[in-house]
Amino acid sequence: MAVIEQIIAGNWKMNLTLTQGQGFIDTLLTRLKGKELSRKLLLAPNFTLLSALAQRCAGSGIGLVAQNCAFQAAGAFTGETSVAMLKDVGAEYVLVGHSERRQIFGERDDLLRQKVNAVVSGGLIPIFCVGESLDQRQGGEAFDVVISQLRCGLAELPDSQLIVAYEPVWAIGTGRTATPEDARSMHLHIREFLVSQFSWGERVPILYGGSAKPENAAELLAQPEVNGLLVGGASLNPESFLQIAMA
Ligand code: PEP
């Protein structure tokens, strides 16, 4: 099995103003001084914070993630933000297919495939999110749903860097977390799929997301199949984000 550096990624969603985000980074960098972290830290602030946070994080090893992007490269697409624009202000990764984008904004598999391709051709790294709903899990469809999302979203992916985030929809923002065994078995399934599709599938980090917090992070991260966490609510506070990063 390839050795994969664990990743702790914070998704701030539509939270934290510029001043609050800068305060977060200042606290985080102060707390990190003199500490050797074995995990890579990523943060996904709102677009409006990217440029300022990229300057603040320069040289720290913390990577910045955009929460979304346009599938087009440029043109008459009012309100959209291209991958080139995100790269220009310091983003290195882009979340694609977060369940809130799928559910609230109706983003479907074929659009998400175009976004993945736009991210890769724009020189950034996609963090492709997949996950089943509660009904789908209870109906025994969880594996099929997740593999179908991967199959569609990654159908045209060239040899590239990629991160996958498994986020069961019923666990996002609900306080319900998948058991380590649920996470483990789905991650194994995802790994099998990635290895069957890509010669580099062994090296793709697979993160778990869904109500990860300081109290459950160590147990989730102890699963060898879990290569890190995508954290929503608990990433809004630098102290809890750091507790997860050091769990
Ligand atoms: C997320 O938004 O990706 C997420 C996992 O949220 P939460 O940790 O709040 O469930």
Image: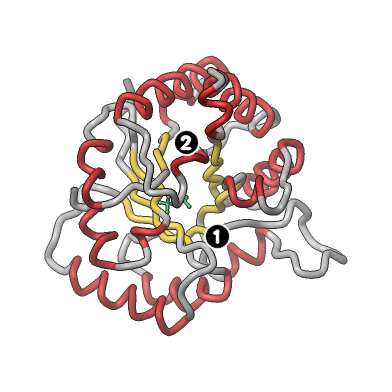
Measured Cα–Cα span from mark 1 to mark 2: 18 Å
**Looking at the image, which is closer to me, 227 or 61?**
227
Image height of 136 relative to 76, above or below? above
Is label 2 in a helix, a strand or a loop? Answer: strand
- Establish if 232 lies above or below 89: above
Residue linked to disc 2? 166
Q: Tell us which disc is closer to us: 1 or 2.
A: 2
Q: Label 2 sits on what residue type?
A: Tyr
* Residue 206 visible in the current orientation: yes
Q: Residue furthest left?
A: 34
Residue picked out by circle 1: 66
Above or below, comparing residue 193 to residue 120 in the picture: above
* Mark 1 or mark 2: whose residue is earlier in sequence: 1
Q: Which quadrant holds residue 54?
A: bottom left
Image x and y of residue 52, in percent: 47, 78
Quadrant of residue 220 within the rendered picture = top left
Residue 238: mark in rendering: none
Residue 247 location (% of width, % of height): 18, 48
* Total count of labels: 2
Say what amino acid the circle numbered 1 marks. Ala
Q: Residues within 10 Å of mark 1 (few under 14, many from 20)?
A: many
The one nearer the camera, 219 or 21, is 219
Q: Position of residue 144 (x, y in %)?
A: 59, 19
> Residue at coordinates 40% horizontally, 39% vertically from top-left?
207
Residue 163 visible to the viewer? no
| Local secondary structure at mark 1 | strand
Within 8 Å: ligand 1 and the Cβ of disc 1?
A: no
Q: Residue at x 34, y 36 (%)?
A: 227
